[in-house]
């Protein structure tokens, strides 16, 4: 597990990816994943941890 800013240069970059992914979410599982990420981000901000798998899934959803 890595800190959020190990994956993104700024918190704004993460927020943009999260916003795009939320717009592209099609399944309940995707929506629940993104709600969980947003909740953790609201609680921990740039101190949040994000695994490589979570980062990969977020980026795939954001790029759809």
Image (cartoon, rainbow, N blue to C red):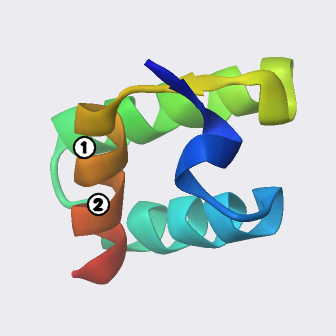
In the rendered structure, the answer to whether residue 54 lies left or right of residue 45 reads left
Position of residue 45 relative to residue 63, above or below, is above
Q: Which secondary structure, mark 1? A: helix
Residue at 52%, 26% (x, y): give it: 2
Q: Nearer the viewer, residue 4 or 36?
A: 4
Residue at 69%, 61% (x, y): give it: 15
Specify which label sits upstream in the sequence, 2 or 1.
2
The quadrant of the picture occupied by the N terminus is top left
* Tally of numbered discs: 2
In the rendered structure, the answer to whether residue 35 lies left or right of residue 27 reads right
Q: Which residue is mark 2?
A: 25
Q: Nearer the viewer, residue 37 or 51?
A: 51
Label for residue 55? Answer: none
Residue at 48%, 74% (x, y): give it: 20
Where residue 48 sits, quadrant-wise, is: top right
Q: What's the CA distance linking mark 2 and mark 1?
A: 6 Å
Position of residue 5 relative to residue 60, above or below, is above
Percent across and percent down for residue 7 are: 53, 50
Label for residue 30? Answer: 1
Badge 1 density bin: few <14, some 14–19, many ≥20, Cα 10 Å: some
Q: Are marks 2 and 1 in contact (CB under 8 Å)?
A: yes
Badge 2 density bin: few <14, some 14–19, many ≥20, Cα 10 Å: some
Percent across and percent down for residue 11 are: 79, 56
Q: Which secondary structure, mark 2? A: loop
Where residue 39 sits, quadrant-wise, is: top right
The quadrant of the picture occupied by the C terminus is bottom left
Instruction: Identify the residue at the far bottom of this view.
Output: 64
Position of residue 35 relative to residue 27, above or below, is above
Where residue 59 sits, quadrant-wise, is: bottom left
Percent across and percent down for residue 44 are: 81, 20
Q: Nearer the viewer, residue 12 or 23?
A: 12
In the rendered structure, the answer to whether residue 17 lies left or right of residue 27 reads right
């Amino acid at each position: 597990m890595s800190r959020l800013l190990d994956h993104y240069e700024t918190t704004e970059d993460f927020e943009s990816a999260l916003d795009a992914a939320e717009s592209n979410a099609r399944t309940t599982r995707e929506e629940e994943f993104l709600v969980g990420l947003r909740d953790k981000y609201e609680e921990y901000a740039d101190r949040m941890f994000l695994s490589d798998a979570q980062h990969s899934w977020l980026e795939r959803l954001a790029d759809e």
